[in-house]
Image (cartoon, grey):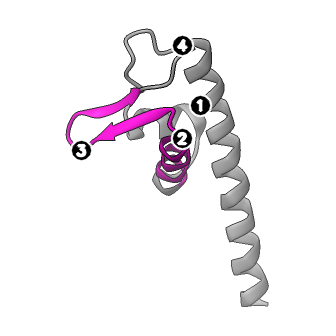
Amino acid sequence: MPAATGKLDRTRRDLDTRRLRDLLRSEVLSGTFRDGQLPSEASLMIEYRCSRATVRAALDLLRGAGLIERMQGTGTFVVAER
């Protein structure tokens, strides 16, 4: 039973990550972040009711797609054109 629970947890986490990625991608492409800076990880966790791991994974997917850039200690910024 524990192995099945772990697999379900990973599947749920993957779904949450993709859902958050899709929501943030839509906001990035629609110009929601007018100043070019996304909210902090903590703010995204609260707004979307998800874990820090989910937020980081979603942001990593967006970075991999070339939509955002992350700078440690500075923030996360939109680099894609609308």
Q: Quickly name the residue at label 3.
A: 72
Please tell me which residue is depicted at 52% across the width and 17% down the height of the picture.
81
Please tell me which residue is depicted at 30% across the width and 33% down the height of the picture.
75
Judged left or right of residue 6, residue 33 is: left
Q: First in sequence, mark 3 or 1: give its number.
A: 1
Q: How crowded is mark 1: few (under 14 residues within 10 Å), some or many (20 or more)?
A: some
Q: First in sequence, mark 4 or 1: give its number.
A: 1
Residue 24: % across, % down: 59, 31
Looking at the figure, which quarter contains the N terminus? bottom right
The kind of secondary structure element at disc 4 is loop
Q: First in sequence, mark 3 or 2: give its number.
A: 2
Q: Quickly name the residue at label 1.
A: 24
Residues at marks 4 and 1 touching, judged by CB atoms closer than 8 Å: no
Q: Quickly name the residue at label 2.
A: 62
Q: Which mark is residue 32?
A: 4
Q: First in sequence, mark 2 or 4: give its number.
A: 4
Assess whether residue 46 is covered by the magenta stretch: no
How far apart marks 1 and 2 lie (CA) works out to: 8 Å
The kind of secondary structure element at disc 3 is loop
How far apart marks 3 and 1 lie (CA) works out to: 19 Å
5 to 49, vertically: above or below: below
Q: Which amino acid does label 4 sit on?
A: Thr
Residues at marks 3 and 1 touching, judged by CB atoms closer than 8 Å: no
How far apart marks 3 and 2 lie (CA) works out to: 16 Å
Judged left or right of residue 7, residue 35 is: left
How far apart marks 4 and 1 lie (CA) works out to: 9 Å
Q: What residue type is labelled 1?
A: Leu
Residues at marks 2 and 4 touching, judged by CB atoms closer than 8 Å: no
Please tell me which residue is depicted at 50% across the width and 24% down the height of the picture.
80
